[in-house]
Amino acid sequence: MWFLVAGVLFLALKYLEVGWLAGVTWWWVLLPLGLAFFYWELVDPYWGISKKRAVRQMEERKQARIDKQREALYPHLRKGRRR
């Protein structure tokens, strides 16, 4: 995501000829966009980074729901305290 943000920012600054990017060639300006494409099309699907993160978040939400329901059903059985 950072590559995409940097690429769009570099494009805007190069187009408006602001700062040091006015003198830089277009290849250097477009490099972050190419790296973002490389990451999303090759690296992420190969290692499944986004999928693993989504599964982990889904499992955390599932466990939170289970804990909430368990607390509602059995209020006398709190974590760390049993009769």
Image (cartoon, grey):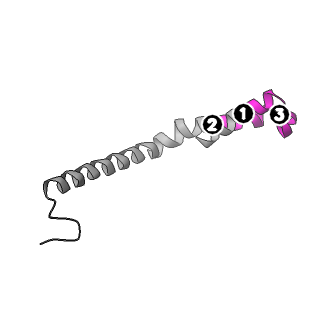
Q: Residues within 10 Å of mark 3 (few under 14, many from 20)?
A: few
Is 24 a magenta residue?
A: yes
Amino acid of disc 1: Leu
Q: Give, as a three-letter code, the residue at label 2.
A: Leu
Give the Cα distance between marks 3 and 2.
18 Å
Identify whether 14 is placed above or below 51. above
Q: For numbered disc 1, what is the local secondary structure?
A: helix
Q: Is residue 83 left or right of residue 36?
A: left
Determine the residue positioned at 19% across, 56% down: 71
Q: Position of residue 5 (x, y in %)?
A: 64, 38
Say which quadrant the C terminus sits in.
bottom left
Quick check: is 51 in the magenta stretch?
no
- Give the side of residue 24 with respect to residue 30, left or right: right
Secondary structure of residue under mark 2: helix
Question: In this figure, what is the number of numbered marks?
Answer: 3
Q: CA gap, disc 2 to disc 1? A: 10 Å
Q: Main secondary structure of the magenta part?
A: helix
The numbered mark, 3 or 1, whose residue comes first in the sequence reads 3
The residue at which mark 1 appears reads as 30
Q: Which residue is mark 3?
A: 25
> Which percent across, then down, holds residue 40?
53, 37
Magenta stretch, residue numbers: 10-34
Pointers 3 and 2 in contact (C-beta within 8 Å): no
- Disc 2 designates what residue? 4
